[in-house]
Image: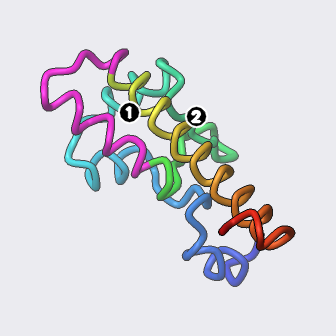
Amino acid sequence: MTADDSFGRLDDDDYPAFTMGRAAEVLGTTQGFLRAIGEARLITPLRSAGGHRRYSRYQLRIAARARELVDQGTPIEAACRIVILEDQLEEAQRINAEHRLTAELSDPAAAA
């Protein structure tokens, strides 16, 4: 990948642009916290060619939600499970909305 290719992906939420150190700094947490949520399988960072963990903005948002729950006193394993369930619920609601829209477009009388 060239520098031009990397520059074009800066707006990509899934592009692993953050090193572990920078991710921890952005989140205001420790690298140990990032390792712990990785071990709990909340997020799986990509690895650089040298084997270093790299995080995307999407992963940082997920980690920030887990940190918020942990800061409120939720054990890390439970916080990770809550975040996973929240993410699954959001996805299910999005799919349901798409199906609802498709049904309304194919049968406008049913929507009334």
78 to the left or right of 102:
left
Q: Secondary structure at mark 1?
A: helix
- Residue pictured at 63% horizontal, 41% vertical: 47
- Residue pictured at 77% horizontal, 73% vertical: 108
Q: Secondary structure at mark 2?
A: loop
Q: Which residues are magenta?
A: 60-78
Depth order, front residue of 11/104: 104
| Residue 101 percent location from the top left of the image | 71, 66
Q: Is residue 15 above or below residue 3?
A: above
Rendered-image quadrant of the N terminus: bottom right
The residue wearing badge 1 is 34
CA–CA distance between discs 2 and 1? 10 Å
The residue wearing badge 2 is 44
| Residue 97 percent location from the top left of the image | 63, 58
Depth order, front residue of 64/1: 64
Indicate whether residue 32 is drawn in magenta.
Answer: no
Rendered-image quadrant of the C terminus: bottom right
Q: Earlier in the sequence, mark 2 or mark 1?
A: 1
Depth order, front residue of 51/92: 92
Q: Report the magenta stretch's main SS.
A: helix
Q: Is residue 46 above or below residue 18?
A: above
Indicate whether residue 77 is drawn in magenta.
Answer: yes
- Residue pictured at 13% horizontal, 29% vertical: 72
- Residue pictured at 72% horizontal, 78% vertical: 5
